Amino acid sequence: MSESPDHSSLAPLRARLAAIPTLDAEALEAEAVALLGRKQGELTMRLKGLAALPIEEKRAMGGALNVLKNELEAAVEARRAELAQATSANANRDVDFSMPGRAQWPGTLHPVTVVVDEIVEIFRGLGFAVALGPEAEDEQHNFIALNFPPDHPAMDMHDTLYLDPEGASRPVGERMLLRTHTSPVQIRVMRDGPPPYRVVIPGTVYRNDAFDPSHAPAFSQIEGLAVDEGITFVDLKATLTHFAQRFLGADTRVRFRPSFFPFTEPSAEMDVGCRLCDGAGCAACKGTGWMEILGCGMVHENVLRDAGLDPERWTGFAFGMGPQRIAMQRYGLHDIRLLYGGDMRVLTQFGGVGR
């Protein structure tokens, strides 16, 4: 049997593949399966039918079919490459490469978080460890163990954010609330083991305050506690003055004003010269030229006794500050609401946000 009829019978298969539209991906894949499919492909079926042919015809037709199979597979891959190139070209037509690129918004630390970390590191250098505690507290830790009298205004639901308003009938000390300061962690530290203690306590606190240029209802706070034998008010002043001048600059002016806190005696407010107005007076410093950054004092002997410590042997000091006010001093902000309002025009100025 001559080879020419057999070869001519393969011509329609070549023609079918050549007729497939270049950009018709579905038609290309459908025709590839119809011709080369492993089960029902037309070329595959012809190859399977070689077994029934005489040996001479099998050799001749088998060789021609294998050549055609290679041709068809190469043609299919070439068409796929053309399709991919054409698709990419069409996609690029929709992109205007002359337009400026869109700004990226990489994540970064909030300015207050940056300040908190810096404050913690300064006190770490003075030998203070970090202590943490729960934000949902009971009255025992938040007030009573800190020498608050049962009728103190801060224990009123109108002044403090209680978690269970229906719990007014519960015994004093058992009602749950959002902590108003991080001082409860001081109680937990002192009840956990014997002195000496030197801890700094960062965290979020909550108060029923108006949102104004210098107050916020939820804000960060850092407290510190040092208890040992022979600690005096001189140690307190030296420690906090060192902190202020390390953080705000060696030329920072510092003053201590007498104050009152139930859990310290004597107590003081620590002010620094307002860097926003350079002492001239502004809304942030309430026209005084001084910015209050923390309260402090010697740990009250009742607080020591409640923690099981002998006030005749152990003394200590405690302090608490709002790092957002210090951030205002650092970054020249006159309104605390700028830190919490989510205004990216403000936040992009710090820490590389949006650059």
Image (cartoon, grey):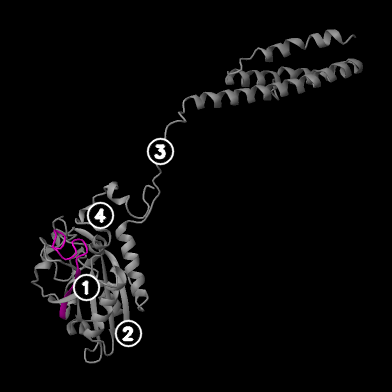
Along the line of sight, the residue nearer the viewer: 75 or 16: 75
Magenta span: helix, strand or loop, mainly?
loop
Point out the tag, 1 or 3, that comes first from the N-terminus: 3
Q: Does any portion of residue 294 appear in the rendered image?
A: yes
Point out the tag, 4 or 3, that comes first from the N-terminus: 3
> Which stretch did the figure color magenta?
266-285
Q: CA distance from mark 1 to mark 3?
A: 45 Å
Q: Answer with the quarter of the image where residue 299 lies.
A: bottom left
Pointer 4: what residue?
339
Query: Disc 1 marks which amino acid?
Result: Arg
Point out the tag, 2 or 3, that comes first from the N-terminus: 3
Query: Disc 4 marks which amino acid?
Result: Leu
In the rendered structure, find residue 253 and report the number of the disc placed on it: 1
Q: Is residue 262 above or below residue 113?
A: below
**Residue 284 magenta-highlighted:** yes
**Location of residue 298 in the rendering, given as x and y in whole percent from the top left corner:** 20, 82
Pointer 3: what residue?
102
Residue at 26%, 81% in the rendered image: 238
Q: Is residue 96 above or below residue 305?
A: above
